Amino acid sequence: MCKDYLVGRQHQERFPKNSLHCIEKILYLIHFDLVGPMKIPSFKGSKYFVVFTNDYF
């Protein structure tokens, strides 16, 4: 079997709707995503940006 067929047939479990843990304090669990370099820079010349998400409930 070819590699592309096997990759296409892989199964991924659904992300659970309920978390197994509960964060009770602000800034204890933070996710971030760094994007870039972008071909076209922003108005101020930036080619990268970062997004921070706090998982506080």
Image (cartoon, rainbow, N blue to C red):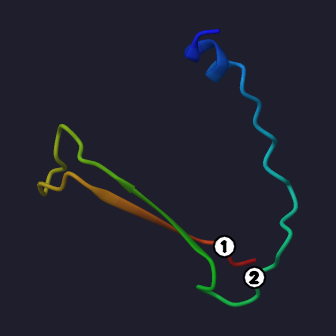
User: Residue, x 69% and y 78% (percent of image)?
Assistant: 56
Q: Quadrant of residue 57?
A: bottom right
Q: Few, some or many C-alpha atoms within 10 Å of disc 2 (few <14, some 14-19, many ≥20)?
A: few
| Residue toward you, 43 or 55 | 55
Q: Few, some or many C-alpha atoms within 10 Å of disc 1 (few <14, some 14-19, many ≥20)?
A: some
Residue 7 vs 42, above or below: the answer is above
Q: Residue furthest top?
A: 1
User: Residue, x 17% and y 39% (percent of image)?
Assistant: 40
Q: Position of residue 27 (x, y in %)?
A: 58, 85
| Residue toward you, 56 or 15 | 15
Q: Residue furthest left?
A: 45
Residue 35 vs 22, above or below: the answer is above
**40 to the left or right of 8:** left
Q: Position of residue 35 (x, y in %)?
A: 35, 51
Determine the CA span between mark 1 and mark 2: 7 Å
Q: Quadrant of residue 44?
A: bottom left
| Residue toward you, 16 or 43 | 16
Residue 48 vs 56, above or below: the answer is above
**44 to the left or right of 3:** left
Mark drawn on residue 27: none
User: Residue, x 18% and y 56% (percent of image)?
Assistant: 46
Q: Position of residue 34 (x, y in %)?
A: 38, 58
Q: Position of residue 5 (x, y in %)?
A: 63, 12
Residue labelled with disc 1: 55
Residue labelled with disc 2: 23
Whether residues under marks 1 and 2 lie with C-beta atoms below 8 angstroms apart, the answer is yes
Of the residues under marks 1 and 2, which one precedes in the sequence? 2
**14 to the left or right of 53:** right
Which residue type carries mark 2? Answer: Ile
